Amino acid sequence: MSDNVLETNGLTVTFGGLNANDSVNLAVPKGSFVGLIGPNGAGKTTFIDAITGYVPMSAGSATFDGQDIGELKPHERAQAGLVRTFQSLELFEDLTVRDNLLVAAYPTKWYSFILDMLHLTPTDHEVEERVNWALDIMGLNNEADAMPTDLSHGRRKLVGVARALAAQPKLILLDEPAAGLDTAESQILGGHLREFLDHDMSVFLIDHDMGLVLSVCDYIYVLDFGQIIAEGTPAEIRDNPSVKAAYLGEQAGEIQAQAGEAQRMSTAKDGEVTS
Amino acid sequence: MIDLPVVLAANLLQNVIFGLIAGLAAGAVFAILGVGLVVAFRGSGVINFAHGAIAAYTAYTFDQLREPGGGNIYLPWIDPIPELGILKTLHINNLPVSIQIQENPSTVLAVVLSLLMAALIGLMLHFLVFRPLRNAPTLGKVIGSVGAFLYLQSVAVLNFGASNRNDPGFWEFTSDADKKPPLENFLGLGSNLPRSTIALAVTAVIVGAIVWAFFNYSRFGLATRAADENEKGAALLGYSPQLLAGANWIISATLAGVAGLVFLHRTQPSQFILLVVPALGAALMGNLNSIIGATIGGLTIGAVASAGVSLTNESWWPTDALPADGIRQFVPLLAIILVLYLRGDKLPIRGSISIGRQPRAPATNNATLGMVVAVTTVLIMSNIFTSSWESALTTTLIFVLFMQSLTVLVGYLGQISLAQWSLAGVASWMVARLAADGTAVRELDFFVKDGPGLPIPIAMLGAIVAAVVIGLLVGLPALRIRGVQLAVVTLAAVVAIEDLLLRNVWLFGEGADTTNPMPVPTIGDSSLSGFNPESNQTDNWKYTMFLLIMVAFVGFLVVNLRRGAIGRRFLAVRANERAAAAAGIDVAQTKMLGFGISSAIAGLAGVMFSFKLSQLTSENFSPFVGLALLAFVYLGGITTLFGAIAGGLLVAGGLSAEFGALHFEGVTQAIINLIGAIGLIVNAIVTGGEGIALLQTDQGKHVLSGLRRDPSIAPEDGPLTISQEELAGTEGATV
Ligand SMILES: Nc1ncnc2c1ncn2[C@@H]1O[C@H](COP(=O)(O)OP(=O)(O)O)[C@@H](O)[C@H]1O
Ligand SMILES: [Mg+2]
């Protein structure tokens, strides 16, 4: 029990009669890498929204680090170490990349504004180091002083991940971090994902890229129409007939994924993609 | 024995019921105005703060046409070439302003011309303000709307003068409703009801029904509603979206004109300007898209406010603490807050419309040089200047100080509040009250004020605390209400603060709104007051130094705030509240902190301002002054200290105005405000609201040359944006 960093019990989210999440039981053991897959509209983002407090749970409960988090506000959950990224970017557009990370990394006290205004706040080297590490691991060192709007879509997604890392999470929730990345960016991300585990954190990953999920996760849940229809190790999921049935076979899926990828890249290059 | 309370209660009930009915007159105007706001919003997605000003201009036009010696119309602009020197003798006018029609035109002609004027203003708003802003971020639209408000208000003052106009109005010619005696003992409720009350209520219902039917059954109405959902929808019905928007502006403005005409017999034309507040309440009760809802909402707000006011006539009512006017203004505020608060979310929901690009807010990492230059300049000026120049210098300093409260709240934190100047007012009142001890401040003072007689530094502190408390209250709705809607709430708060607090006899003693003798701060024996009773001028060098220290100190604080962790958090909240919460930021607390800091600065500015005067009146803090200040700080640059300095130089009474007065005759406050209003609109269109201060930066130059490619400034067809959710959708089930 207590070696699960996150645990949900019968978690249900209802939007106007429709169960976007239906009695989801899911656990993320401490120090592990857990994946959640499912077709579009299955309710994956809703699941993250629910455990981070962005949408109310209609039923069920969620425990984080041994504590029931049902009553906590979103920022309190983040402060407790449950940190998410967004599928739709949601960066701070008026802050540089480094400042985006610093926002999440710097703890503040109620009196911080007084020290700040008098310019008496000492630099916190530990925080600065953590920010540098997060920039480094996402390959953003050269873009640290750029504005997010000047970066490609893929780079911006990496900033989103780096910002979550900078917050020193106990559990990082990644919502389709690889969607919209080009091959090089995908490799940066994929190559470093498991490294996160070395920094005292567990990882929860949602992604469309089946190859990525199968290769990095210790354990995978499959969501369809809001319900968990399968769970298991990557090998078990690969061979699970109901998963295959739900997704018309892995092959078809992968072909589609590649087609989607190609389209995404061409759109992203036009620089017109905004979210 | 038992009968007396029963009789009293029955009496009270009668009064309240009568109050509700009598309030339908004002409610009718709110309803018609509210319907017009809904039409404009549906047509172009803009909340038009200038809507009441259109009604005012129409009412003025009608009155001017029928005025003895009038019979002319003033077009809604002024001749931009000042009449000076040789131009004056040559009478060169390059823009016609006044058109003589005929003495004593017929009612029909006067009505038609007035409504045409309203329609013309609607067209101007469309072509000159809101069409260019159609793809601008929320902020741009809000300040464009505030700019239009200030523009029309200033032009009305310049063309029609500031004096009162008593017009018997429209009914005199039509139904003779008000010439006939009122309906005595109406429905046996014991009071007399003017006949026009019923006529007004019926008019509002008819107008609402006609507009509703028009939009529901005509092709044009269908196309507008289709365009509301999807611009292509309108195109399918054969209308260009921009044509629709323009036509809706004409309808909306004409409706404002109708409201101005039907209510003219009860009020001053200038009073219509602020009726936009209850009208906004009405429109919001209709969810900004229901005409029936706005009509009912307007009538309800009018009725409830009037019933509230009728309570103030009861003997037990604490009129001193809760004056009738305050109640009247408080009801619309409450309606607005309730509607918006209940509908708002603590965090914006996923995929809700983004607020768009915000003006950049670069950190000033090395402000020392700039500060030294600015302070030295002021030191030199204060040694050279005397009398009116020194007064202009202190005015500029006061407003630089004040504008920094907006830098923090609007610039850093992105909370568009129109109420900060009213908070400065609260602090001014408070310092006068707290420092007063029942004796005359100056030998020749006519008025004395009672009070605890606190030492001035403590009174100042108390005043700032009062501003913070009220500021936090005004800020509370911001926890759920954002963007333009917050601007609406704070505008309503401005009106309510003026009538509920600044005129509050219980809080501030007799003559609260007209005479507040200001205390004199001293060091040793010398006065730090800006008002010099010997010369009857405001030219005290020590006061200038006192101010300079305050301005520089606050400048130091505000610049540092932006550089630190809290400043980053402010900008994070401004950019994206959802993401801010995910970064562990308590959005509610951060907003309250911003409102608190900003209100403290505004309070200090109010206190310093009041030391400049011998007596304070509520006119110093009228809503128009507050909006003009907001206009100028936007023009200067809302996000930086140098923007605040630029803004402070531009304000009426400030240094550039003094300079202008030296060279051009007749540069009045109205003209300065007019220039500010135009500058504000141009600023919104050209830079998206970034202001002068940022134009010197590289990116700013980009903006100037119009080369900046920005997704929010998109071609005619609207922004071409593909959200990630949509992108993901195209991939289908790819797992
Ligand atoms: N705030 C909301 N209100 C109503 N329905 C929603 C909301 N958020 C998500 N949904 C619906 O819930 C379902 C699951 O959506 P989502 O969690 O985004 O799926 P996924 O992330 O797996 O693609 C979808 O049908 C979506 O339309
Ligand atoms: Mg999703």
Image: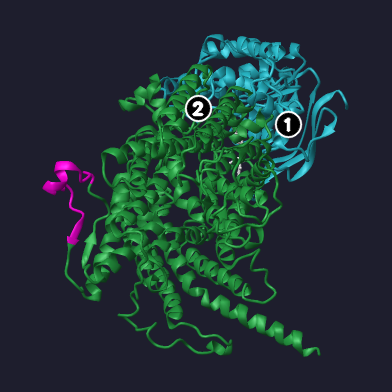
Q: Secondary structure at mark 2?
A: loop
Q: Main secondary structure of the magenta part?
A: loop
Find disc 1 in the rendering and name its residue.
Answer: A110
Q: Nearer the viewer, residue B284 or B80?
A: B80
Residue range of the region highlighted in magenta in the rendering: B80-99
- Separation of residues labelled 2 and 1 (CA atoms): 23 Å
Looking at the image, residue B95 lies above or below residue A148: below
Which chain appears cyan?
A
Residue A90 visible in rendering: no
Q: Which chain is mark 1 on?
A: A
Residue type (three-letter) at the residue carrying disc 1: Trp
Amino acid type, callout 2 = Ala
Q: Is residue A49 above or below residue A179?
A: below
Residue B450 placement (x, y as % from top left): 66, 57
Residue depicted at 54% across the width and 45% down the height: B610
Mark 1: C-beta under 8 Å from nearest atom of ligand 1: no
| Coordinates of residue A99 in the picture (x, y in percent) | 58, 20
For numbered disc 1, what is the local secondary structure? Answer: loop
Q: Name the side, left or right, on which A13 lies relative to A86.
A: right
Quadrant including the N terminus of chain B: bottom right
B584, B9: nearer the viewer: B9
Which residue is under mark 2?
Answer: B361
